[in-house]
Image (cartoon, helix red, strand yellow):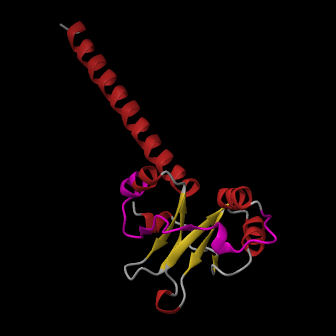
Amino acid sequence: MRIGDLCTREAYCVSSDAPLLEAVREMHRRHVGAVVVVGRGAAAGRPAGIVTDRDVVRAEMTRRADVFSLTIGEAMTVNPLVLEESCSLAQGINRLRHRGVRRAPVVDARGKLIGLISFDDVLPAVAESLTELAKLIGRQSRLEHDHHSAGDEHLEDR
């Protein structure tokens, strides 16, 4: 499974000079925990940063300012982890874990933003894989039991 198959394709994009309040309102309206900051000019459509709900709180605390007076650029995480849509689920999880983040912008082969992957997108796919593994173990145990039981019946026939 690829990250591009799991990501949310409706990532909300903002520019770094926009008011932080705009991002906060949009996160609230969409029930999401992050917005992607995109570049301009030659970097248009490419992730330049990310603003998460944690970034908002951290910016307010470190800058001793409220959400009404800050810009997105003052709160965003620059150079966010970016995952390519062709990245495997295992690679994506490993890279998220290595960077210690729960969300990452997802880009196409040209580096253009196509979506956002989050822990909430990954967890159901991992749970489904674990469920299939559990079914395999259960099936194997039943087959072994049936095989041994059939062998015992043959012994009794002698």
At 43% from the left edge and 36% from the top edge, which residue is drawn?
A: 134
Return the residue nearer the eye: 51 or 12. 51
Residue 101 on image: x %, y %: 52, 54
In this picture, is 150 found above or below 7? above
Q: Quadrant of the C terminus?
A: top left
Q: Is residue 146 left or right of residue 46?
A: left
Residue 91 picture quarter: bottom left
Give the x, y percent position of residue 58. 68, 56
Count the marks. Answer: 0
- Residue stretch in magenta: 65-94
In this picture, residue 32 sits left or right of residue 139 = right
Residue 14 falls within the magenta-colored stretch: no
- Residue furthest bottom in the image: 41
- In magenta segment, residue 69: yes
Residue at image coords 82%, 71%: 68
Identify the residue at image location x=46%, y=81%. Answer: 112
**Horizontal and vertical percent position of residue 37:** 59, 75
Q: Quadrant of the N terminus?
A: bottom left
Q: Name the residue rendered at 73%, 63% in the picture.
A: 31
Give above or below for 128 relative to 86: above
Q: Residue 139: where, in percent of width, then height?
A: 37, 33
Of residues 141 and 80, which is closer to you in this image?
Answer: 80
